[in-house]
Every structure is written in structure tokens, then in C-alpha cells.
Amino acid sequence: MGRIVIDPITRIEGHLKIEAVVENGVVKEARSSGTLFRGLELILLGRDPRDAPLITQRICGVCPISHGTASTFALDRAFGIADKITKNGRIVRNLILGSNFIQSHVLHFYHLAALDYVDLTAASDYDGPDPELQRVRRFLERGELGPFLPRYEGDYRLSKEANREAAAHYLMAFEIRRKAHEMLAVFGGKAPHTVGIVPGGATEVPTVDKITSFLWRLNEIRSFIDNTYIPDVLTIARAYPDHLEIGSGCGNLLSYGGFPQEDGLFFWSGTTSQELNPEGLDPSRITESVRYSWYASSKDPLHPAEGLTKPRWGKEGAYSWLKAPRYDGKVYEVGPLARLLVNYAEGNPKVKGLVDWALGELKVGPRAFFSVMGRHLARALDCKLVADAMAEWVMELDPGGPVYTEYELPDSAQGFGLVEAPRGALGHWLKIEGGKIAHYQCVVPTTWNASPRDGKGQPGPLEQAIEGTRIKDERNPFEIVRIVRSFDPCLACAVHLVRPKGREIARLEVV
Amino acid sequence: MGKTTEVPVIWLQAATCSGCSVSVLNSAHPKIAELLLEEVVPGRHLNLRFQATVMAGAGEPVLEVLEEAEHELKGGFLLVVEGAIPTAEGGFYGTLGEEPLAERAASLGRAAQAALALGTCASFGGIFAAEPNPTGCVGLGELFKREGIMTPLINLPGCPPHPDWFVGTVASILLLGLDGLEEARLLDEYRRPKLFYGRLIHEHCPRRAYFDEGKFAKHLSDEGCLYELGCKGPITHADCPLRLWNGGTNWVIGCGAPCNGCVEPGFPDLVSPFYEKLKEA
């Protein structure tokens, strides 16, 4: 029996460690630990509630806008203005968040995930005309290969030509994600960490020149998504057909729904499972268990509006500092896969046609989405859906029209904001007392996905996805990192506290 | 083509949101691909040996890169630290490869030729050192002081810092050398390059005329100076109004929001509430 420890897991957001117990070449038990606690929920207490969207954006530099939006929605509710946001305010917020979806997804596929499948060294003897590949060749010739080596070796399956093409796209994608941030800044001021989304609406009044500059940046990006990103995902999926099977996870999917429209949400909310029956969503059934987490509890599990974050070192049986969010007591995965398949199950026409097209391209059924490659494919399709919709939204703006609604600061109030972040369902819950923040809890996508076992002993989605996986070479456990990265984890978002080194209680030796 | 000198860089992420990394990815001139692959100034290539957000490897093999820098590249690499350093509870709030980040930052800091504290957290503690500072976060300079580390340090605050500030500072080090920077007195009292942090936002703000006329915005999205709505431009040292953000697209006040003073040592506690008017000094 072997024990694999991977720390750090790189090319993710935040600090993550994975431990896996391997028996006869198969992972018998997997445990994920975040290794950084920053205590932002504690830092928020006693502050001016209006500061929360700016402070919570600092949870994550990859998807700050999602936190800013969830926090803003929670404040809109607390201030009693959730239904008074102007049309321009609503659209500007959607455009800022949507721009960051694109930035995050392109970054994730090309710069965080692709190096698991794409071998940049295929450009070492390139003698063609592409200046980007010539640049890679010159780099390789100099012989100092950081940050592209060292790496786990052993499973690069693309042909030399396909590798070279993907290497060129890796570099091109840097520019596309940069332009997505420029697009965000048109209405958001700057990125990362925008200032344009505020309780009451937005800060920037749209003008025709801004609308046009947004639209033309978006046009270039949409062309990349259609002609490069989605085809690249399909190419890699075809080269790694077994990755349409491994890492399937818990099989239950949840979406809060997102991007408010005049009549409801662009992505619908709901839950579903591998049978793809639409099963609805009732946020009051969300709970967090700390049975296997190092937190004190008088009652377990608790709804996030009542959630406690009281660290208890050495709690009997606990092994993680992440809590375990559950819906209706069951384990649920969130993210682009969940967002798309919940909408597919519910028959959202925008989603259904695109998902069916992709399934036809790969000649697989919807069940294949529950896999490493399925998550990458869902993310690419998600990117297209948002980008295409933004081209319509930006033209619905009313140039010069109001973006902001004034409000009174309440002395005491409460609110919650549920959004879809690039990585999935994100919720902020807050209470205001004496005009100050008295309670703040964030339940973030990666807490769902990388959660530990709960009060019933059910492992979290990522743990379930790793368990049962065959490992070819324990010294190069690329299967594990591929599964982890397919979830696009954001540990900075997820982690409440750290596992202390050298304390007996912290050892995770199992079996 | 002359021989290229490789400049090894170790980029350590401590208590961070990774926003500084994401911001540097937004570099427009040079593009990030050029920064990674090409000579950043003629004859010098940044050899980014450790950067957890982009590096190919994971686990044990990449920890060896850190060990190697510490022992075999002594005095021969540039350390970039992103994020504050958690020091409470013996540094256990943040670990990398099962070692406290505080220990890693100190031992790498001791071995480095020079250190760049990238972002407000690494420079001064920033958001994660805000009251009540639950994890005992400090900036890199404070860690160096506590540990008696004499390695030259430059602070590049900003939440996030502008990519040009990073690239321009690295280029300055490569072209002028650290001694050159010191001799020319190019750093301010907080060890920030004056080139980028030498003037107040307020001095070059396009809404300055409104301030001088006393025309103040009453609500967000209104015309007028944002001073009454909490703008910290009058006490914030950065070149945002001239340089603009995201390839010159826009900036904070450009989109109608008040500056929140993110490059200052007092960020966030002394410059918040962000939407309340500055208290008279």
C-alpha cells in the first residue's frame, strides 16, 4: 500500500495538498487539505457593510468579481433595493461578471490545465514561420526551462503537430484572457479587483463609445472561443478518451443560476443527478457539516445564515479545515458541469442545443460529461454561452441612462446573495447590526467540491472523483492532478483554516 | 546574437488571493509570453523557476527547485513574494510543502540577491493583516526586520499592483543594478520606486478641476469630484490617472468609483470605510 502526497498542487488558485492511499495501483482513499487560512470573515466583522464587496473580492484574484457580485446582491437585499436596480445597472454588472467568466475559463484551460496534456517541448525543432513557435524554440534552445520543467512525466499523447498547435494556442490564450480583462475594465475600471459593481447598481454610465469598444473586444474573443478554445478541448478529449470516464465524482449537480435578466435568470437554478431529471433548488436545504472539520459545533449541520467558524484544534476524528456543504443532506458538485447539465435537464433552450452538438462531436452520451474531460468541455461551452449572450446584453444598454439607485443604510438588516461564479455556486450570507457587519459567511464553489466527509461519512465530490482511480506510476501521479484540476479548484476561496504541522492530531495516515 | 544571461526568479505566494499574479499576466508591453520566453532587457532573461500559478510541475519535484535556490543559488536569484506572511501560531496558518510559509520566505529571503514585495499584502500586510489580523500577517519587510535579514528589498504595493510597476522595476534592477537604484535615490520612504509612486492620484486626476471648483458628486455615477463619496486620491501615491489600467483601457476614478488607497501602508484599515469622506488630518 502506498501513500502519495502532492503538496503543493500547482496551477490552481491557492494552496492545496492532496493525500491518496493507493492499494494495488488504485486510489483507495483520498483526502484534500487546504494549507492557508486568512480569516477574511473575521476581518469583515464590525466594518461598514458597503466595504464588503471590495474586501471579499480579495478572497480570490482569479474570480474576484463573483465575490463582489454575491456580496453586492446580499447588500441589495439587506438595503431593500434588490428589485430597484436599473436596467443599465443590471446589465453593466452582468457584463463585468461575464468578462471575468471568459478570463477565468480561458486561463484555466490553457494556463492551468493544458500543460497536463500538451508538451511544449514539441516546438524544440520547429523550423516553420509561426513567430510564437519560433519564440518557444529559442526559449527551449537556451536550456533554462522554468517554469515549464520539472513536471510529472509519462502521458503526453498528442502528435507533434497537434502539440505545436496547442503550444501556439497556449501563448495566444494569454492575450485573449488579457483582453477579456480589458473588456471588464471598460465598465469595471480595472481588473482584477473591480470597483464598478456596488450596492445600488454600477458606477459607470454607459456611453456609445464604451459600448462599441466592449463589443469589438468581445467579437475577437468570441472568435477565439469558437475557432480555437472549443476545437482544442475536443482535440484533447479525442486524444484522451479514457479521460471521458475517469474522475466522475459524486454524480449530483447543483446550480444557483445566474446573470439576472429582465424576466428571470440566464442560467437557471436547480439540481440534478446522472439520470438528468430536473429536481429544483430550495436554498433553505443547504447546510454545512463540520463533523470531520476542525470546528466546534453545538449542532451539526447548520444553515450558512447561522453558520459558525470556531476553530477547534485537535477535534476528535476531524481531518480538514474545509467545512462540508451539503444539499438536502447529500453530496453535490458545482461548477460549469453542474450549471450546464442542470439547465440541460430543465430544458433551457440556450443550453440544450449546444450541449447536444458537443455530445455529437464526441459521439458520446450525456453521462460522459461526468468526467475529467467532461468538466473541461462543459467549461468551454459555458464560456461560449456567456460570451455569445454578452454580445446581446451590451447592445441592450441605454446610453446615458441611469446605472445607480440610491438607498438608506439600515441600522439592522440581513441578506444573502447567490450567484454562479466561473467555478460554480457561490453564496454570501450577512447580518448588519448597529450599521456594521455583525455576521458574514461565504459558502464558495470549492468548499462544495473539495469538502471533506460529512456527518454521514460521505466523502466530498473531489475525494469521490479521485477514489477508485488507477495510478500508473506513483512517482508521477498525473491522474490525480488532472482530476483535481478538472474541478478548477480555488483554495483561497475555500479554506477557513490550516492544518498545523507537527501536531499528532493532524496526521492523516489512514487504513 | 550575444549570450543570454539567465536571471533566476523564485516567486513565492504566501497569504494572497493570487491577484498580483493575475495582474502581472495582464502585462501589455511586454506581453506575458514575452516576459516568460524572451530577454526582458537585451541580454537578460528572467528564468522563472518557481511560480505556483503557472509552473508545469507539482509536489516533490518543484519543492526541490526551492531547496536548490536556497542552497545552490545563494546570492544569485531574485525573490518575488506575493501575499502577506502569516506569523501567528508559529506560522502554521500558511504552509507550502509542509513547511510554514514564514520559514520559507525567511530562508529564501536570506539567500536571495534581492527581494521584491509584490502587492500591498507583501509590502505592508494589506487586507489579510487588517484588524483583527487573525493570522498575524506581516509584510516581507517586517519579516526581514524580525529575522535580521539584510537582503535589499523593494516594495511594489497595489491591490493589485499594475503590471508595468513590476516589469519596470525588474528592468530597473537589471539595467541599473540595486546599487544604482539606491545611489540615484529612486525609492521613497516606503521603499517604493518613485517612478510609479512619486505623485498623488489627486495631482493628475481628470476630476481635479471639479475639486478646485468645489463641484462634488452626491451619488455614485454622478459627475463631479468623488471626494465626498470617499475618494482617497488626495493621500494615495500612484500614477494610475496617467498610466491607466488594463492596457490603458480605464482606471478606478475613470469608471466613476472613488480611489480606495490600495497602495498605501494603511490599506485597508486607515483608508476605510471606503465610501466615507477622508477624515481631516
Image (tube, grey):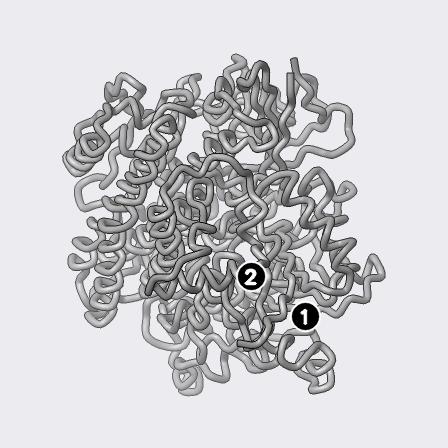
Q: Taking the image as drawn, is residue A212 in sight?
A: yes
Q: x, y (%) of residue B206? A: 40, 81
The chain identifier of the residue carrying mark 1 reads B
Q: x, y (%) of residue A336? A: 33, 36
**Pointer 1: residues within 10 angstroms few (<14), some, or many (20+)?**
many
Q: Nearer the viewer, residue A76 or A367?
A: A367
- Quadrant for residue A223, please give it: bottom left
Determine the residue positioned at 78% across, 60% down. B74
Q: Nearer the viewer, residue A369 or A401?
A: A369
Decide: is A460 above or below B174: above
**Disc number for residue A237:** none
Count of all numbered marks drawn on residues in the image: 2
Mark 2 vs 1, N-terminal side: 1
Which of labels 2 and 1 is toward the front? 1
Secondary structure category for the residue under label 2: loop
Q: If the image is split into quadrants, where does the N terminus of chain A sit?
A: top right
Residue B271 left/right relative to A374: right
Determine the residue positioned at 16% across, 57% down. A396
Q: Amino acid at mark 2?
A: Ser
Q: Amino acid at mark 1?
A: Ile
Q: x, y (%) of residue A111? A: 44, 49
Residue B25 left/right relative to B151: left
The chain identifier of the residue carrying mark 2 reads B
Q: Which residue carries the number 1 mark? A: B154
**Pointer 2: residues within 10 angstroms few (<14), some, or many (20+)?**
some
Residue A73 left/right relative to A432: left
Q: Which residue carries the number 2 mark? A: B272
